[in-house]
């Protein structure tokens, strides 16, 4: 079992997401890793990156790939490394920068349309995620940001019949500490 598998499957706690290479790499001065770190903590490499930190695991990986492209262009080694580094776990996972505060519970009613879910919520800018827990793991259904007191989640995968929809809210330094099942008004 690899280090990443040990980190993700540790029954006593461990990682919920990892960026790692799938095998030994020989990058120029660890540029990929420096780009990854700089995207999460801007200013590590003043010649590269944005002043705004990335928070989602997949975006952090893509920023590292972009840094390597910027520094070394389209060499064969660069192209190989773009594919050697991957995210393990949820690519949309958002990193914490401090212990988060708790967001309020997600209220009902919820309206489910053919390609959206509407959820009233009082915290502007919060991101609401809909998911289903199945025998094969967690299945994302949709995600949307609260604007004017309502989150409109765009459906990424049609909800499975007979499987409860669960909802959580998050934003920088704030999370809901539970997955709230909600009664849906299907229309």
Image (cartoon, rainbow, N blue to C red):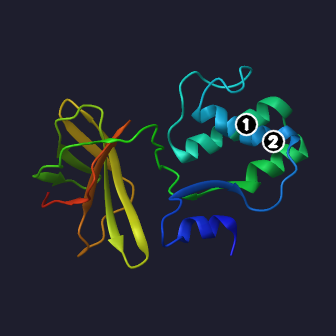
Residue ranking furthest to the front: 12
Residue 88 % position (x, y): 59, 60
The answer for how far apart the CA atoms under marks 1 and 2 are is: 6 Å
Counting from the top left corner in percent of width and height, residue 42 is at 61, 26
> Can you tell which quarter of the image residue 86 is in?
bottom right
- Residue drawn at (29%, 52%), measured in percent from left and top? 115
In the picture, measured across the screen, residue 67 lies left or right of residue 155, that is right
Residue designated by label 1: 34
Question: Which residue bears the numbered disc 2?
Answer: 30
Observer-nearest residue: 42 or 64?
42
Please give left or right for residue 97 compared with residue 22 in the image.
Answer: left
Query: Residue at position x 88%, y 50% from top?
Result: 26
* Residue at the extreme bottom: 135
Q: Quadrant of the N terminus?
A: bottom right
Q: Position of residue 52 (x, y in %)?
A: 53, 25
Q: Residues within 10 Å of mark 1 (few under 14, many from 20)?
A: some
Locate residue 162 relative to residue 91 in the image: left or right. left
Q: Residue at x 51, y 43 (%)?
A: 56
Q: Are marks 1 and 2 in contact (CB under 8 Å)?
A: yes
Above or below 129: residue 151: above
At x 79% / y 38%, what residue is drawn?
31
Mark number, residue 171: none
């Amino acid at each position: 079992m690899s280090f990443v598998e040990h980190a993700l499957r540790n029954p006593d706690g461990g990682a919920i997401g990892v960026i790692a290479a799938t095998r030994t790499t020989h990058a120029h001065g660890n540029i990929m890793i420096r780009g990854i770190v700089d995207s999460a903590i801007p200013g590590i490499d003043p010649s590269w990156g944005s002043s705004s930190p990335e928070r989602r695991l997949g975006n952090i990986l893509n920023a590292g790939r972009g840094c390597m492209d910027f520094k070394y262009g389209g060499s064969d080694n660069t192209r190989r490394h773009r594919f050697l580094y991957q995210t393990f776990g949820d690519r949309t996972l958002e990193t914490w920068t401090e212990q988060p505060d708790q967001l309020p519970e997600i209220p009902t009613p919820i309206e489910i349309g053919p390609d959206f879910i509407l959820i009233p919520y009082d915290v502007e800018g919060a991101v609401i995620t809909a998911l289903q827990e199945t025998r094969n793991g967690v299945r994302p259904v949709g995600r949307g940001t609260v604007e004017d007191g309502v989150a409109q989640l765009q459906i990424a995968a049609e909800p499975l019949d007979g499987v409860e929809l669960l909802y959580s809210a998050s934003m920088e330094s704030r999370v809901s500490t539970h997955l709230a099942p909600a009664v849906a008004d299907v229309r």
